Image (tube, rainbow, N blue to C red):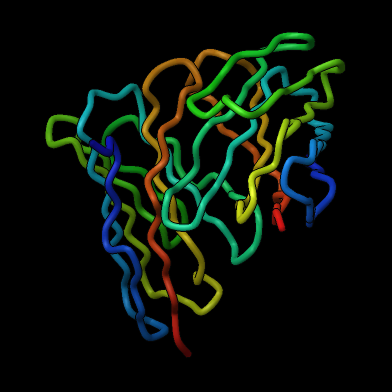
Amino acid sequence: GQQVQQSPASLVLQEGENAELQCNFSTSLNSMQWFYQRPGGSLVSLFYNPSGTKHSGRLTSTTVIKERRSSLHISSSQTTDSGTYLCALERGADRLTFGKGTQLIIQP
Amino acid sequence: GGIITQTPKFLIGQEGQKLTLKCQQNFNHDTMYWYRQDSGKGLRLIYYSITENDLQKGDLSEGYDASREKKSSFSLTVTSAQKNEMAVFLCASSISWGGAETLYFGSGTRLTVL
């Protein structure tokens, strides 16, 4: 079965609303990473988060290892936040297993 | 800062053709990767290279060859393109091998096979 599951598959919000993206994993992990992919573009690393909570501007990542989940919270969303958000499970030494992604659309 | 450059951006080939994708990075990173991204399937690792002249198979290496003749470049060859194949191939690099490193990605090569 799939080791990394992301939800929701897509999310449409109005500008200013908060977004909550989830990542659940079925195996043990060394770490979890979150990436942002611009429409038709490259991936940008948002967080490297093995456990606990990390903040970066309007973004917050929380990983709870014993519950095998990680979340990405975007507060006061903006239209420029639109794109695909991918989580990736690090199984060991540079072997990342990616989820299928959440497509986020922020409408003005 | 650095950049990862993938060429070409768009690649259209015929069934059975051998096709080569190129990737250059100026981060001076040791480790480089090739991922394939299919719609609805996330990213899957094809090959990675820990250092110059090293090659390691990923989860999806069958049907592909790779080459790391220089530290700054990593090329991927589709040995026999499959008809109706359409995917984005993403190159990435990281400072070193061993986990806990941020990956930096190129903007991808979009492959279409007619």
Q: Is residue B25 above or below residue B67?
A: below
Left or right: residue A39 compared with residue B107: left
Residue at (73% x, 50% y) in the render = B109
Q: Residue A82 in the image: x percent, y percent?
A: 50, 71
Between B26 and A101, the residue placed more toward the observer is A101
Q: Nearer the viewer, residue B111 or B98?
A: B111
- Residue B1 locus on image (x, y percent): 78, 40
* Residue A103 location (% of width, % of height): 42, 66
B113 vs A39: above or below: above
Q: What is the residue that sits farthest to the bottom in this orientation?
A: A108
Q: Tell me if I can see residue B43 in this picture.
A: yes
Classify residue A90 by image quadrant. top left
Q: Nearer the viewer, residue A92 or B8?
A: B8
Which quadrant of the view contains residue B25? top right
Residue at 78%, 9% (x, y): give it: B53
- Judged left or right of residue B57, residue B53 is right
Residue at the left extreme of this rendering: A67
Residue B56 percent coordinates (x, y) = 60, 14
Residue B86 is at least partly visible in this image: no
* Residue B12 location, quadrant: bottom right
Image point 49% across, 57% down: which residue? B39
Q: Is residue B50 above or below residue B27?
A: above
